[in-house]
Image: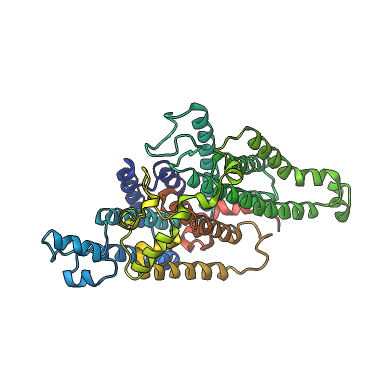
Amino acid sequence: MPVLFVAFVVLLGGSSRSDVASLPLLRGGAVLFACWALAGMSRDDWKCIRTPLVLLLLLAIWTAVQLIPLPPGTWQALPGRGTVFAIDQLLGQPDVWRPISFAPSKTWNSLLALTVPIAALLVAARMSSESQREMMFAIVGISTFSALLGLIQILSGVGSAAYFYRITDPISMVGLFANRNHHAIFLAIAVLVAATLLRDELMRKRQRKMVQVGLIFSALFLTALTALIGSRAGFAAGVAAFCLGYAVVGLAWRAGQSELPASKRGLSAPQAFATRWENAILFAPPVLLALALGATLWLGSRASAVARFMGEGVADDLRVRAWPTVQSMIDLYWLTGSGFGSFAEIYKVYEPDHLLQPSYFNHAHNDWTEAVLTGGLPFVLILFGAFVWLGRAILARGLRNPIKGHRGDMRLMVIAVTMLLAAASATDYPLRVPSMQVVAIMLLMTIIPASPVNRIGRKTSRRSDDSGLRA
């Protein structure tokens, strides 16, 4: 069921817009998945997700509070309401009751959007260790399909039926997403997942060569595609994910080679590390990736991420030029926020003349600042609580040798995914996309031990699988 849930959300939830036609189906389906999870949850399941669930419910409560109409005197006393109040006076309506949010319809949409992450948390509580691995394999498979779909989109041209969303990047490889940046970040996350799964495969006593080859191919293919998509942040994330994954897999592979009996190797353990064959295997992935990136440079156009790195100045980017305006808005609305989802509407009030253009500035392209601007201090406190919970969950599993790790050790992947999304949120808004929310939650919950009920339910299959592990 977790695999089906992830596939369902990624298929329908690749856009952050509030007017996507698939949203009612997505949110209705999420509610059904949540009902399935609730029907079989035990007390231990609730304990596993108690803190993150409370944080999500607090977020829902604060979002609802932003929709409550306030008395005129209270509302007018809030910072940044002078312009609207002046308009009310000109219209002869100075006593209108208004909510905190400047865009109540968008805030309502934000409140309804919480059904997806809440459903993801409930479904994650039902995952066993085995279903966690199945979910991770599904993420790698879905990301590979999305990358292949992106290639079809480029080959088929503008207006192709391969593009799932009406408002999208019509000349970019967006895959199952509406935005190329989000697609690239998703592929980078999948590279980390593939590396973690490959490390676990290398630590098995009974090697599954076809699975290993498939994971290696997926990691190389996805990393190369992040350069062709055209997202600078996504390309940087892809390279960083590959480097970290390569270090993890390399350590696991060498550890496996050192544990082989000398009779099978024909060499002693110290000599085995120096053989040309082992070095060729160990250094093949970066060589293949370098060739793939070289082909990307040769075939890529101005749309490629590498070309954008070399040919476009970051200072010319609208998000950089609009930063002083966004900063002044934060100074006004940091206490209560302007309302979740209201950035585009409130920005129009303060948008300087020299930045006016035919298209509108839909987000601050820095979710850290937009979180403060639209959610205010209460949202910052909720966000701080989430990081405290995540830090404690990681520390509870220990920090000893996280890079080498052991089979089933998800600490490094969770830390890497968190840092990758945190960095991407400084230049974009990936976690506003429902599919990215679900993938992030499902992966972060892998560091939480499965409840005894789920472990017992998988006892037979896990024993048969673990029999192939090294001692």
Residue at the image position 19 percent from the left and 68 percent from the top: 70
Q: How many marks?
A: 0
**25 left or right, relative to 4:** left
The residue positioned farthest toward the top in the image shown = 156
The residue positioned farthest toward the left in the image shown = 92
The residue positioned farthest toward the front in the image shown = 354
**106 left or right, relative to 459:** left
Residue 439 shows in the view: yes
Where residue 93 appears, as percent x and y from the top left, is: 12, 62
Rendering quarter of residue 290: top right
**Compared to 422, does 31 lie above or below?**
above
Where residue 268 appears, as percent x and y from the top left, is: 88, 53
**Compared to 456, does 465 lie above or below?**
above
Rendering quarter of residue 102: bottom left
Assign the C terminus to one quadrant of the image: bottom right
Rendering quarter of residue 334: bottom left
Residue at the image position 49 percent from the left and 32 percent from the top: 153
Residue 53 shows in the view: no
Where residue 164 appears, as percent x and y from the top left, is: 41, 36
Where residue 263 appears, as percent x and y from the top left, is: 86, 49
Residue at the image position 49 percent from the left and 59 percent from the top: 445
> Which is nearer the eye, 396 or 174?
174
